[in-house]
Image (spheres, helix red, strand yellow):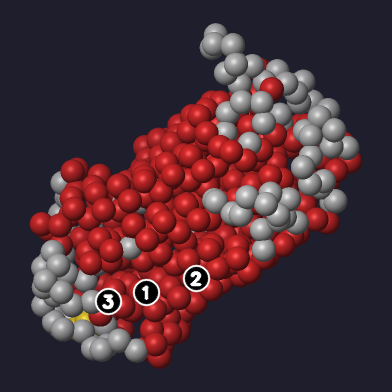
Amino acid sequence: MTTQNSKLPLRLKFIHGFGAVAFGVKEISLTAFLLIYYNQVLGMDASLVSLALLVALLIDAVVDPIIGNLTDRTYTRWGQRLPWLYTAPIPLALAWLVLWSPPAEGVPQFWNLVAVAATVRILLSACEVPSTSLVPELTTDYDERTTLFRFRYILGWMGGVITLTMAYTVFLAGENGVLNRDGYFGFALFGGVLMVVSVMGSAMGQHKLVAKLPKQRPAPFSVISSFKEIFEAFSEKAFLIFATGGLAAYISQGLTFSLNNYLILFVWRLDTAPIPFLPEGITGLSIYPLALALSAILMFLVVGPLHARFGKPGSAALCAVGTTIMTIIPYALFMAGLWPELDTSQSALTLLGLLIVGNTMGIVVLISATSMVAEIVEAYLERTGRRAEGAFYSGNWLVQKCATGLGIFLSGQLLSVIDFPDGADPNLVPQPIITDLMIYYLAATVALMLFAGFWLGRFPITREEHQERLQRLAAKPVRSAT
């Protein structure tokens, strides 16, 4: 496919980004609901659940380089990426249903959870790796790449927000809320269908543009070459710096998402806080997904100007500090006795307002980091003469998944360390346990985000260096990954 250094059509940006809805469904579901579902609803020990999810994620991380290498070596009249986007979504949806439909009796088994969770993650990678690998091929423009990732992130977040909204208002609404076992099958069915529509719809929308026989036939696939390319990716100084900062940022995200339901139910009690001027029964929890949606919209509006003013590294560092401050404020005020009374609209709206600002900056950190990978592709191309988008984006996924899995694992261990009770009633958990939950969460988040901001701010490829590299590459021959 011919790369472009001009403005891409708005329709293409939207269609490409629409494929990320599946990732948003998966990410919010696994991180926000799976731990509490298997722990509080099905009775599986929290530390075992988090360990199972970590093992599944590590298995997936090992498979990712193979998927990336296979996509780089796919040679069909539909191109390198489309065959994957057409074949992976339906098996993904079926595995997704199995994950949320454990045996009716007894506690789920550790290795059963590992197997199903790993299958889901591998199939999701078979959708997401080829989809994101299209970005450097669609355009070489520094800002247009940011725009493509803006669309991916906002539509991915919208997939997560839609999933949250349907969970809190339809499938897991009512007296037991997220502890309602019967609601999870409908929740899973909805998510599976949305994943299929997202990935296959995006592929169909881009078909005419990318369904072309590659100009050169790539070398045959081998497992050794897959991991060799990942090793080469990590030998790039820019990728190593990105991976160090990204690792911390994604650990923080995994920790926050997996503890999210614990925090909003047991600490902030959003499910009992009424919202003024809205119908009775609408609580802070009901509009929580709206707050996430607003933060994604704000990100979409501000990330372009931030990158134009500070560059991707500067934007990541600045927003890492900002989201850290927004995270500290409510917990510091609560522990100092200055927070509004819980179960009130004032408490809920204040928390949601801070969340919108902090989450906006948190997404800017992640989108800045992900967009950096596209520039690393050209650095590798200049050094080796080879394109290897799939290898680099599978390396990105390896970092993200290992980090997110570690964040989920740490969440389970944290709950175990503070003796958080299984099947707990939000009104009966002792205050010392709630305080420990806040302190441990706050300390981990602050340390991780500041570490992420420090390293991402040191990313060495600037806009000017990228433009100079493109000029040098224009005079060189390009060969596919070998």
Q: Amino acid at mark 2?
A: Asp
How far apart in space, not on screen, are marks 2 and 3 (Cα)? 18 Å
Quadrant of the rendered structure where residue 85 is? bottom left
Tell me the mark number nearer the camera, choosing from 2 and 3.
2
Asked if disc 1 and disc 3 are in contact, CB closer than 8 Å, the reply is no
Q: Position of residue 247 (x, y in %)?
A: 56, 65
Q: Is residue 452 visible?
A: no
Q: For mark 2, what is the residue?
A: 60
**Closest to the observer, 440 or 140:** 440
Decide if residue 210 is on the left or right side of residue 180: left
Q: Position of residue 63 (x, y in %)?
A: 45, 76
Q: Amino acid at mark 3?
A: Asp
Q: For mark 3, what is the residue?
A: 72
Image position of 256 with respect to 125: above or below: above
Q: Secondary structure at mark 3?
A: helix
How far apart in space, not on screen, are marks 1 and 2 (Cα)? 10 Å
* Sequence-first tag of 1 and 2: 2
**Closest to the observer, 294 or 49:** 49
Q: At 59% from the left edge and 46% from the top edge, which residue is drawn?
A: 33
Q: Secondary structure at mark 1?
A: helix
Q: For mark 1, what is the residue?
A: 67
